[in-house]
Image (cartoon, rainbow, N blue to C red):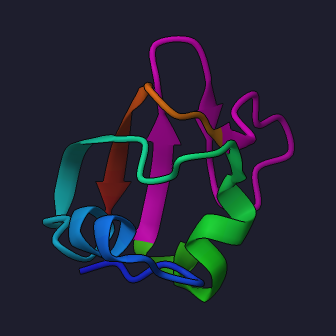
Amino acid sequence: GIEIADPQVFQATQLNTAAKGWNLIGCPYQVSTSIEAAVGTKKDSISLIKNFDSIWVPAGSSNSLDSFEPGKGYYIKTK
């Protein structure tokens, strides 16, 4: 599973239990949080994160998604 930097109980539950492949999760934070900060050193385990409007790819040069926003859902593809 994926473990995030600076985990809280809710965050760890959603991201640590992410299965290999596609996962749909609700925002694991109560405030807007940078995706880079959230995934920390675990970004090698993630292929991409997206919602209906934007996408984030590790080391991507044209990422349009930069933070998790409370009340929104995200698709996360793990390796």
The residue that appears at 13% across and 65% down in the rendered structure is 19
The residue that appears at 26% across and 77% down in the rendered structure is 16
Image location (x, y in percent) of residue 30? 53, 47
Would you place residue 37 above or below residue 54 in this image?
below
Image location (x, y in percent) of residue 57? 62, 49
Res 54 seen here: yes
Would you place residue 13 above or below residue 58 in this image?
below
Is 47 magenta? The answer is: yes
Is 20 magenta? The answer is: no
Query: The N terminus is located in which quarter?
Result: bottom left
Quadrant of the rendered image containing residue 63: top right
Question: The magenta stretch spans which residues?
Answer: 46-67
For the view shown, which residue lies furthest in the right direction? 61
The residue that appears at 49% across and 49% down in the rendered structure is 48
Q: How many marks?
A: 0
Query: The C terminus is located in which quarter?
Result: bottom left
In the image shown, does 41 or 21 lie closer to the viewer?
41
Give the side of residue 4 with respect to residue 6, left or right: left
